[in-house]
Amino acid sequence: MEKALGLVFAVAAFSLLIGTSAAAGIGTSSIIVNSSSASVSAGGSASIAYTVKLASGSAWGTTIAASNSGALSGDGITLSFSNSYGNPTYSGTLSIATSPTTPGGVYNISLEATGDDPSSAPTAIALTVSGKPSTNVSSTTTTVKPTTPDYFSVISKATFAVNGSTGGSFTLNHVITAIIPANTFVSENGNVIRNYNFSIIDFSVPSSLSGPNSSLIPYGAYAFAVNGQVNSSISFVNAIGKFQAIKSVVVGKPNDTSWTYLGGVYNGSTYSGGKYTAADVWNHPNDSVMVNDVFFKPVMWVFEQPAPKAVTTVPTTTAPVTVSKATTVPTTVNAKPYPGSDEGVIAAIVVIIIVVAAVAIFALRKKK
């Protein structure tokens, strides 16, 4: 009886050991792709061959999937695997399809093997989506989405698979760079997410959007997104749960700044609703770069520039003077004689005449 009970316990222990080992993973896998990038037009598709290969341990059932497929589907990007499960080594083809409404930009597809032989690190594929394909319009009716003062459109976007333990530096079009420190995780609804998809999104602003005050004019906007969400209920935190800022390095002018814009809804191609909530503080290390190191939520920020100052027109010349003829100014002036000088000259002449006459008369008398 005792031997029978011992055998039962041994079998149970062995079964428990097998179950625990299977749950923790028997070995590790690596994912090899024939191309780490693909380019399509919105509405187009592409395919990439992959191989799930055993890296260590024993071969057990393993599944290949894209860890960020949910975020990608929000942008109209769908993924399908021709062979998603098997014992490594096995191969298949990843089919990528985009929607005609997929915004242009660079998207990161993060492939991971899960199960008994998980991959130790994700395999990234960069998908570049450009201009919408031309279509033949057979209807004369055109649907135009209304533009409102709080309607922002995506210009470009880049999505990256982030390992929170290592962080990294990520850039969009060499204009906006986000630097995520090591041990930066995501806190959402009380849950801490260690690995996540991080997006940098560049938005245009409608011409009808005014600045937060009369001294500022909006000229652009950008946002961070976590797993496809632009939402102030999500926070970046460090290893002990305190807020951890993401550094933003942006190409900008010395007087440029931004305001935080909250309360809107992001649907993958637009951000609608919301309002200005607070002025942001930027450092300007030089004339072409601005830096912020206090943002710790995936939200929207609107770039602002100073409004031009009112110019008061001051005339630089007086009204022209019209001169009909040239005026000649004499260079010399005859002095006016002193009063009485004319009478003196006349008297002197008279005296001389009288003297001459007297002399002449005296001479005639002497001759006689």
Image (cartoon, rainbow, N blue to C red):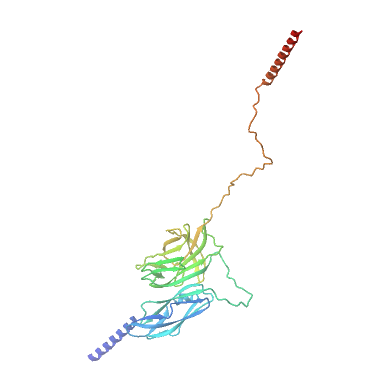
| Up-down relation of residue 169 to residue 316 (above or below) | below
Image location (x, y in percent) of residue 288: 46, 60
- Identify the residue at the far front of this view: 367
Quadrant of the image containing the N terminus: bottom left
The residue positioned 49% from the left and 69% from the top of the image is: 156
The residue positioned 52% from the left and 62% from the top of the image is: 219
Quadrant of the image containing the C terminus: top right
Q: Is residue 332 left or right of residue 193?
A: right
Q: Is residue 211 left or right of residue 328?
A: left
| Up-down relation of residue 13 to residue 142 (above or below) | below
Q: Nearer the viewer, residue 134 or 243?
A: 134
Image location (x, y in percent) of residue 24: 33, 80
The residue positioned 50% from the left and 79% from the top of the image is: 45
Q: Is residue 52 visible?
A: yes
Residue 238 lies in what quarter of the image? bottom left
- Identify the residue at the far left of this view: 2
Image location (x, y in percent) of residue 17: 29, 84
Q: Nearer the viewer, residue 292 or 320?
A: 320
| Up-down relation of residue 103 to residue 82 (above or below) | above
Q: Is residue 134 left or right of residue 17?
A: right
Q: Is residue 116 visible?
A: no
